[in-house]
Amino acid sequence: MGSGYGFGKTILFNEHFVVYGIPAIASAINYKTIARVERSEKDAFEDHRKGTAGYSQAKMTQQMEAISIIKRDLSINDGLHIVLEGDLPAFSGIGASAANSVAIARAIADEYKLNLSDEEINSIAYKAEKAFAGTPSGIDNTAATYGGLIWFKRSADPYSDEPPLVERIRTKPFDMLLANSGVVADTKKVIEGVRERREKDRETYDKIFAQAESIAHEARKALEANDLEKAGRLMNEDHRLLQQIGVSSDVLDGMVELALKAGALGAKLTGGGVGGCMIALTPGNQQKVEEAFKNAGFETLKITVGGE
Ligand code: MEV
């Protein structure tokens, strides 16, 4: 039996904009998906991850496509019994699909003693992400493979497979809180929606994208200076831009308000949006903000970002 892991992730700045070459900031989170793989007569798949009800079923067709992409890329023709587990919940918005593609690619490599480098695993997982996201930027699989807090910028052409620029961002560690809206979102459709709206109104979208670009640069500076108050204000601004491109929802907007009222320095949707998760910056008050979310009936994940 082979096994492998992939990290979950959260995007602190610029999901969606990143697909068009605007820089984004993301961090792996301290929760992982583990995949176990055994050769078997027929392909079989078991999902033991905890998560949003209906997540696994809603993603099943895309999941099977991702597994075939990985098998094809690694020239595996045997049947495989694949089991997913680990402490990363299957919520939308925290990179659950990329984490599982990385974990499965690593588990297959382990089973067949392929001795693949992280770069090779990342490149396979990027191809598999296309099943879930159509034109992924590559940020999720990169965070899932390598971990850490990263600056990520890819080609402005969403169809280009040119390697992105990835740089590590160094900060003191700080606490954040993720909360799940409980809504499973189809990232591929949300990305297509942004593309359609942008094509219809390039002028407005170009202005919003330019603001997102300057937020990324300011946010990087603020994080590197450990200026969390500023980073929080920039997260709030980034959420407003995400609202303007149509990827928030009433539930996500309400969650952002709840986080700010409970004392978070900043909050925004994270990941594909429409459903999925909210991320709040909570240095020194993670517990208090978490309680507000638990009292309102949301599932939460406490995370620490930055540091070594
Ligand atoms: C999804 O976690 C982030 C998106 O920007 C898609 C991507 O970058 O691949 C929406």
Image: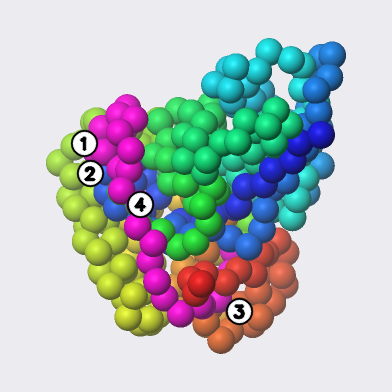
Direction from residue 33 to residue 142 in the image, left or right: left
Q: CA distance from mark 1 to mark 2?
A: 6 Å
- Image spot of residue 162 (x, y percent): 30, 33
Residue 259 in sight here = no
> For mark 4, what is the residue?
166
Q: Earlier in the sequence, mark 3 or mark 2?
A: 2
> For mark 1, what is the residue?
201
The kind of secondary structure element at disc 1 is loop
> For mark 2, what is the residue?
205
Q: Earlier in the sequence, mark 1 or mark 4?
A: 4
Marks 1/3 in contact by CB < 8 Å: the verdict is: no
Q: Amino acid at mark 3?
A: Gln
Mark 4 or 3: in front is 4
Q: Is residue 84 magenta?
A: no
Q: CA distance from mark 4 to mark 3?
A: 29 Å
The kind of secondary structure element at disc 2 is helix
- Image spot of residue 104 (x, y percent): 66, 35
Q: Residue furthest right?
A: 41
> For mark 3, what is the residue?
286
Q: Amino acid at mark 2?
A: Tyr
Q: Earlier in the sequence, mark 1 or mark 3?
A: 1
Q: Earlier in the sequence, mark 2 or mark 4?
A: 4
Quadrant placement of the N terminus: top right
Q: CA distance from mark 2 to mark 4?
A: 25 Å
Mark 1 or 3: in front is 3
The kind of secondary structure element at disc 4 is strand
The residue segment tinted magenta is 154-178
**Res 150 quadrant in image:** bottom left
